[in-house]
Image (spheres, coloured by chain):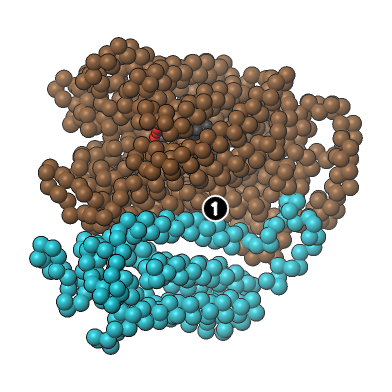
Chain colours: A brown, B cyan
Amino acid sequence: MAAAAHADVHANEHDHAHEHHELSFIRKYIFSEDHKVIAKQYLISGIIWALIGGFLSLVFRLQLGFPGIDLGWLKPILGERWFDEAGKLDPNYYIALVTMHGTIMVFFVLTAGLSGTFSNFLIPLQVGARDMASGFINMLSYWFFFLSSVIMFASLFVHDGPAGGGWVVYPPLSALPDAAPGSGTGMTMWLVSMAIFIVSSLLGSVNYVTTVINLRTRGMTFDKMPLTIWAFTFTAILGILSFPVLFSAALLLIFDRSFGTSFYLSDIYINGQALPNQGGSPILFQHLFWFLGHPEVYIVILPALGMTSEIIATNSRKPIFGYRAMIFSMLGIMFLAFIVWAHHMFMTGMNPFLGSVFMLLTLIIAVPSAVKAFNYITTMWRGNIVFTPAMLFSIGLVSFFVSGGVTGIILGNSALDIQLHDTYFVVAHFHLVMGSAAFFGMVAGVYHWFPKMFGRMMNATLGYIHFWITFAGVYVVFFPQHYLGIAGFPRRYYSYTGFDFTNKYQDLAELSTIAAIVVFAANIIFLFNFFYSMFWGKKATANPWRSNTLEWTTPVNPGHGNWEGEIPAVYRWPYDYSKPGAAEDFIPQNIPFSATPESNLEDENEQIKEEKEIEGIKFNYNIPD
Amino acid sequence: MASANNSTTAEHLMWKGGIQPMKVGYGKLMMWIFLLSDTFTFSALLVSYGLVRFSFPTFEGLRKNFEFSNAWWPIPERVFEAVPFLHGISAPLVFVGIMTFILIMSSVTMVLAVEAGHRRDKADVEKYMLWTILGGIAFLSSQAWEWGHFIHGTEEGLTLANGTKVFGANLVQNQYGPPAFADFFFFITGFHGTHVLSGVVLNVLVFYNASNGIYEKRGHYEMVEKVGLYWHFVDLVWVFVFTFFYLV
Ligand code: HEM
Ligand SMILES: [Cu+2]
């Protein structure tokens, strides 16, 4: 046995032979191949994007809450040309702001910032690997993301403004550069940036799946993986299978824009002139877009749900309720996500029979979603709950997921959607269920794994303040929007002053705006806490939350390779909290059953005899990579 | 894959972690996953083609009376019936048949190269890689000719309703039928051609490395296998593209 372990250490050393010398600053922090550094790069980029996206939303919220308000003081930041003499926002720029806000939040913050950070950080640490399968491809993935970020950012400042027309960039508007200011250069850059973003996302996802398959440590069978890892894996699979379809759609759109093809164009007049384009179909684009678009919303939420499972179980000091049910419901959600896309298209003139089929499939998603919600609640039920900031944010996520999910069921009925489509009701729905829920998951993840990332603790008091303001604030921002939507406020409108009925709702819009400003301010507290704690926070211990997963068995500041000695083997699932008979209220995954006779169940005693066998498994270095 | 078998781990432990469960390294695994993803790229394009194609009427009359018109989708046999050097002779789908044959043969030589890699027979790997590269280049050149002919058009051209004459096809107009037919033809065969081109580049790299003995030194020819997977995939996609554009 000792010899075997020795050989294993050697083999790993051999694997890392090229890293014995000190890495230069550039290789260590910039073009790094270490998954932990790449994760932090994604996190910082995500935070910057969140600030930009949040700022843009405040600008258009001000216009919505106080139509015609003087925003002239923004000229130095956004450019003279978007405001008239009275400082009123330009309507075309308004729609561009909405578009960029959506794009930035969905793709750059909640896809790259969320999956990029936590899949990278946690997959190797929690499955027990020294790094991702390919550090190089991982690095490439980040730098493609960076490139796409630069292009998207630059597009904010081009002469005719960034892309307009919504984050879904429907043709014909997006296909005809002459159709609107937001369809010009900004749109071209949007498409190029997205194409590069997709490449980055694929490189990342391929790595995540491969790592989970090939590099689990000894004993880490699939039914012992933390739910975070399951969630990240499903997310990666969703991305691998749906992003390429957006890639095709974007390429066809680029051809329509720049090379005169008519994939999405037919029967169009601009300024009374008939265009020559015939035979294409704008609905085709919508099908292709939503084939990605719907899975994308789960790409955003699944990682957050995975982290929440982990955080809620740890802080309830109880095993997760329904571990397998959680996996199967995620699997179900993933499968269904591919066959419900047309619920975004009930109102596009699609065949109503097809609409009924998609309605049925859509409503089925409520079942696995509800299973997850109930499992969170039953995990907390009668637990010894520790209200850390991470735990509070996870509970907040569950709350948003439920309140936003309920309105999803309303929207999923094609008859009700006739009234509600493209109104603020939809905006309220997805900001709760996706936007806020995923954002809370991300923040919860930061609070929870901050000690592992930076070796220090974040300040809990500031965390509580951050939580309560944000949690209440989000409801104040989005709850009124349900009523606006039911009353008939369409989304993406510059102002509603043309319709009399809207006047009596103006106070609700104002309330939304004020609350949005408060929430934004509360998140500045978070930023302060984040950067302050990074340098001056309390030093962390190795396992501050008394958690079971493998990342807490590494040194406080894990180096490249994560574990100093041999990678620990795994014997049990990650949810042995408050096990009857055990001395402590948690038993980490790397503690063998043979060491805990006092708390073992019968079938666990059976597993003791397999322990030696599992410890003896050796990575096969003869298999070429 | 003789080398992979000297693992000491028992079969029932393969999925217990600590070892590559499917006995493949990460590189090949990544290639498989990438190809799965690329399948969706092509499927999206082919499904789009299908949707647009069936939104147009098909020619109703007898086949022998078929004429090109913007009003209906063309019959592919009538569009693709030229062969180089045989000017004026109608040989429906003969040339594209030859192209398809070339591409399939290059897959066969690729299999032989992979097999030679398993035997670690450097000379054979080089030989078969070279044949594969030649096949790829031959396919690309044929496609260039096919495109050229399609772009150039026939002498008669097509007279539109407003009296103007159209010769050949490009992304905006098409003498053989609705412009959408040409748009999709150029886009999808072009997208596939780009894949073939990158495949040829990869093959050249592998050939270069193999002849420099890099794989010999490394002790395995895994790289040939990975690129081989890609090559077969590109080949398989062509079969679908061929079916959609030339047979349906
Ligand atoms: C019970 C489950 C759910 C159902 C039945 C449901 C149903 C729907 C329907 C029918 C729409 C289209 C409304 C319209 O445009 O008229 C919609 C929009 C949307 N949903 Fe959901 N949804 C559910 C859960 C979710 C979840 C979990 C997320 C994200 C994590 C999400 C994100 C979105 C987004 C982003 C949109 C709006 C997209 C846009 O038009 O910009 N939904 N939902
Ligand atoms: Cu959806």
Name which quarter of the figure residue B143 lies in: bottom left
Residue A6 rendering spot, x and y as whole percentages: 79, 54
Name which quarter of the figure residue B190 lies in: bottom left
Residue drawn 62% across the image and 38% down it: A329
Q: How many marks?
A: 1
Between A415 and A383, the residue placed more toward the observer is: A415
- The residue identified by callout 1 is A206
Q: Chain of mark 1?
A: A
**SS of the residue under disc 1:** helix
Residue B34 rendering spot, x and y as whole percentages: 52, 58
The three-letter code of the residue at mark 1 reads Val
**Residue reaching furthest left?**
B163
Residue A329 appears in the rendering = yes
**Quadrant, the C terminus of chain A:** bottom right
Residue drawn 65% across the image and 52% down it: A213
A570 up-or-down from A598: above or below: below
A272 up-or-down from B19: above or below: above
B171 up-or-down from A30: above or below: below
